[in-house]
Image: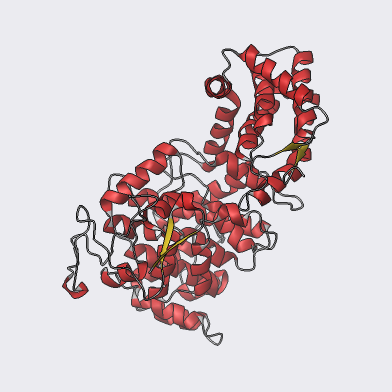
């Protein structure tokens, strides 16, 4: 039985356990395999996947049973030494001697462990020559998780797909792991090692899926890049699940720790997690790490949204996102160099600064979009519209068009609660004469307002951005800013009575 769940716009489908519907297979890319035992290691597009289409919504939606997929596909086994170390780690009576004894029978893995503990990331003054000494100094949990992600990545196939590069994939994974661990430390996460490992392994199912569905994932990965859409959203629309669900299934078959598996499975739900007051630090850190750019991305399309979510974290002495990214970049170079992963030609801090500069100087390109949306032929008409909007909503409550949406209502409420802080930041930038910061803040608010259903605010924020871009007199900038602030103070959550 096929069950269609959630918002019909996303056409999300799941297979009820034990009731997979037998449907006509899409012969253009999948071959019907009646006997999974006949599958060769090379495969032929092996699968007992079946194409199930929701007849009322999306004819391109393909339903795939993940359990069946991973049962049929010839998955590689984890190295025995890694499996044994995972078993030992579950016994509180076992210590460094037991770990070292297992590693002595796997020279290659022991060598990797030594390189890891001797990296500048740990900063030991003297080089360690004993595996046991290294385990004692950095801790069993750290070594266990290092062995785990080393073993898992050793099994990842290289699908030789033009839209996927395994070396870049490793770079992305390490960067996400380090970001989650640094953020987890700030959030007082209970287990930083598992936070690091879960973030690092969050996309591990992707190379397996690309190998199984090369045509489909080539198209999905290209669409993600071209249209700035999350891969998980495209997967839900196409298959009814995401790569995080696939990873969860994969980890169960490998008997990996359930906590890591659960953290990986939830990482694609970042928009929901950010509004949960009881969200665990580890869960949030892993989810936010998924918003970092990939090696192949020419633009960091989730930069502004990550900035916004990061600002919602209320912790004393919280570093700026730029400062955190500098720390992550340094750790990446230290570990990547020691492990022979290879360092990037760019850094997260550089990408972040570049994205903010682009946001602050893109007023003229954005103007073309605003012209189309609002029917304006010039900046002056946009400014005139802003003044009319200000007069229209003076001392009048302004509600979001999404205020009554059961899925987005909480996000709208949070946006309204944050508005005083945004207004204060705008005013402070103006008072300090920081035109660049004022322009950047106005640009961010212009985009965010529309996303949260407050279209009334968009032309007002655009007016401030354009006014600062044109180097208008201070009096004119102040006028547009006060109009923006006036309407911003009238924002309300919910719906009109």
What residue is drawn where x is 52% and y is 68%?
262
What residue is drawn where x is 58% and y is 29%?
359
Most foreground residue, 294 or 301: 301
Q: Is residue 179 visible?
A: no
Seen in the picture, residue 180 relative to 134 is either above or below; the reply is above
Q: Is residue 63 left or right of residue 272?
A: left
Q: Is residue 169 visible?
A: yes
| Residue 22 picture quarter | bottom left
Seen in the picture, residue 141 relative to 57 is either above or below; the reply is below
Seen in the picture, residue 335 relative to 293 is either above or below; the reply is below
Q: Is residue 143 left or right of residue 38?
A: right
What residue is drawn where x is 74% and y is 20%?
480
Residue 441 pos. (x, y %): 68, 31
Residue 266 pos. (x, y %): 53, 61
| Residue 386 picture quarter | top right
For the view shown, which residue lies furthest in the right direction? 395
Residue 332 pos. (x, y %): 50, 51
Most foreground residue, 301 or 64: 64
Residue 138 pos. (x, y %): 56, 69
The N terminus lies in quadrant:
bottom left
Q: Is residue 403 left or right of residue 229?
A: right
């Amino acid at each position: 039985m096929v069950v269609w769940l959630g918002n019909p716009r996303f056409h999300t489908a799941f297979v009820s356990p034990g009731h997979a519907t037998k449907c006509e297979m899409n012969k253009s890319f999948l071959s019907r395999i009646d006997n999974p035992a006949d599958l060769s290691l090379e495969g032929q597009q092996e699968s007992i996947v079946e194409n199930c289409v929701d007849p009322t919504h999306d004819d391109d939606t393909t339903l795939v049973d993940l359990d069946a997929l991973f049962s049929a596909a010839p998955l590689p086994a984890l190295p025995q030494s890694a499996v044994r170390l995972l078993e030992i780690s579950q016994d509180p009576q076992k210590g460094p001697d037991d770990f070292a004894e297992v590693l002595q029978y796997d020279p290659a893995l022991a060598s990797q462990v030594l390189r890891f503990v001797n990296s500048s990331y740990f900063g030991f003054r003297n080089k360690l020559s004993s595996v046991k000494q290294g385990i004692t100094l950095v801790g069993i949990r750290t070594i266990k998780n290092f062995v785990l992600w080393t073993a898992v990545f050793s099994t990842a196939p290289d699908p030789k797909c033009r839209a996927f590069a395994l070396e870049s994939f490793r770079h992305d994974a390490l960067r996400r792991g380090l970001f989650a661990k640094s953020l987890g430390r700030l959030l007082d996460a209970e287990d930083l090692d598992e936070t690091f490992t879960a973030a690092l392994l969050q996309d591990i199912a992707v190379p397996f899926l690309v190998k199984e569905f090369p045509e489909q994932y080539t198209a999905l990965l290209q669409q993600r890049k071209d249209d700035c859409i999350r891969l998980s959203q495209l997967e839900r629309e196409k298959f009814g699940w995401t790569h995080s669900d696939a990873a969860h299934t994969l980890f169960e078959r490998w008997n990996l720790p359930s906590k890591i598996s659960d953290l990986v499975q939830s990482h694609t739900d970042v928009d929901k997690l950010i509004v949960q007051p009881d969200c665990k630090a580890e869960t949030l850190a892993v989810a936010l790490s998924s918003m970092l750019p990939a090696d192949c991305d020419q633009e960091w399309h989730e930069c502004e949204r990550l900035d916004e979510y990061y600002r919602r974290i209320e912790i004393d002495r919280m570093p700026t996102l730029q400062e955190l990214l500098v720390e992550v970049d340094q750790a990446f170079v230290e570990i990547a160099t020691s492990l022979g992963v290879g360092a990037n030609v760019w850094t997260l801090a550089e990408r972040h600064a570049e994205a903010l500069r682009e946001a602050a100087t893109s007023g003229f390109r954005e103007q073309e979009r605003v012209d189309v949306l609002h029917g304006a032929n010039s900046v002056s008409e946009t400014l005139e519209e802003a003044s009319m909007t200000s007069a229209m909503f003076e001392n009048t409550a302004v509600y979001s068009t999404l205020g009554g949406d059961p899925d987005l209502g909480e996000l709208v409420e949070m946006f309204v609660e944050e508005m005083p802080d945004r207004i204060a930041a705008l005013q402070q930038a103006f008072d300090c004469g920081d035109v660049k910061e004022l322009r950047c803040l106005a640009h961010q608010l212009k985009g965010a307002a529309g996303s949260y259903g407050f279209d009334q605010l968009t032309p007002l924020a655009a007016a401030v951005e354009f006014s600062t871009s044109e180097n208008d007199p201070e009096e004119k900038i102040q006028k547009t800013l006060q109009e923006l602030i006036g309407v911003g103070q009238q924002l309300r959550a919910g719906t009109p009575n």
